[in-house]
Image: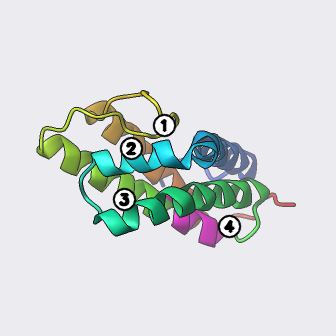
Amino acid sequence: MLLCTNSWTLLLLRLFIGGIFIYASIDKIAHPEQFARAIENYRILPWFLINIFAIILPWIELVSGVLLIAGVWLNGSAITISALLLIFIIAITAGLLRGLDISCGCFNTTGGQKIGLSLIIKDVVLLLITIHIYNSRRVHHSL
């Protein structure tokens, strides 16, 4: 067992992860053009997908975070957040392996934290917590 399975502890973990994703979505939703530049800096997506990702991704983060906190469609939101974290880990790793010196675009579309090993470790920890939430078989507090 990775973490405690107490339903109150799981609620706190959901609040933590959901809050992070809600917070991360706000600046991206407010500044999609700047977020598109942050995505483009990774040099992974073809040009015609960058704007679509810049518009849709923050809304997926927001909705998934809200649903995780509310305990509504808990498994679906946990899977979605896990998939997003896996994508972020892959993108950051690819950027590091190619020697890119770029901002991650995680919480702030202008500037912000540079990609690095510490960011990958943080995302892996968040991924493990989210997987634990998904795998928990206890009764979840929800709205």
Q: Earlier in the sequence, mark 3 or mark 4?
A: 4
Query: Which residue is label 2 attached to?
Result: 38
Badge 2 amino acid: Ala
Secondary structure mostly taken by the magenta-highlighted segment of the chain? helix
- Label 1: few (<14), some or many (≥20) within 10 Å? many
Query: Which residue is label 1 attached to?
Result: 109
**Residue at figure coordinates x 32%, y 41% from the top left:** 120
Question: Number of marks in the image?
Answer: 4
Question: How far apart are labels 1 and 4 at the CA level?
Answer: 28 Å
Residues at badges 1 and 3 in contact (C-beta under 8 Å)?
A: no
Which of the numbered marks, if any, corresponds to residue 87? 3
**Residue at figure coordinates x 53%, y 68% from the top left:** 79
Question: How far apart are labels 3 and 2 at the CA level?
Answer: 15 Å
**Residue at figure coordinates x 66%, y 50% from the top left:** 14
Badge 1 amino acid: Thr
- Label 3: few (<14), some or many (≥20) within 10 Å? few
- Which residues make up the magenta segment? 74-81
* Left or right placement of residue 3 versus residue 98 in this view: right
The residue closer to the viewer here, 98 or 15, is 98
Query: Residue 77, position in %: x, y?
Result: 62, 65
Which of the numbered marks, if any, corresponds to residue 74? 4
- The quarter of the picture where the C terminus appears is bottom right
Residues at badges 2 and 1 in contact (C-beta under 8 Å)?
A: yes
Element on which disc 1 rests: loop
Badge 4 amino acid: Leu
Q: Earlier in the sequence, mark 1 or mark 3?
A: 3
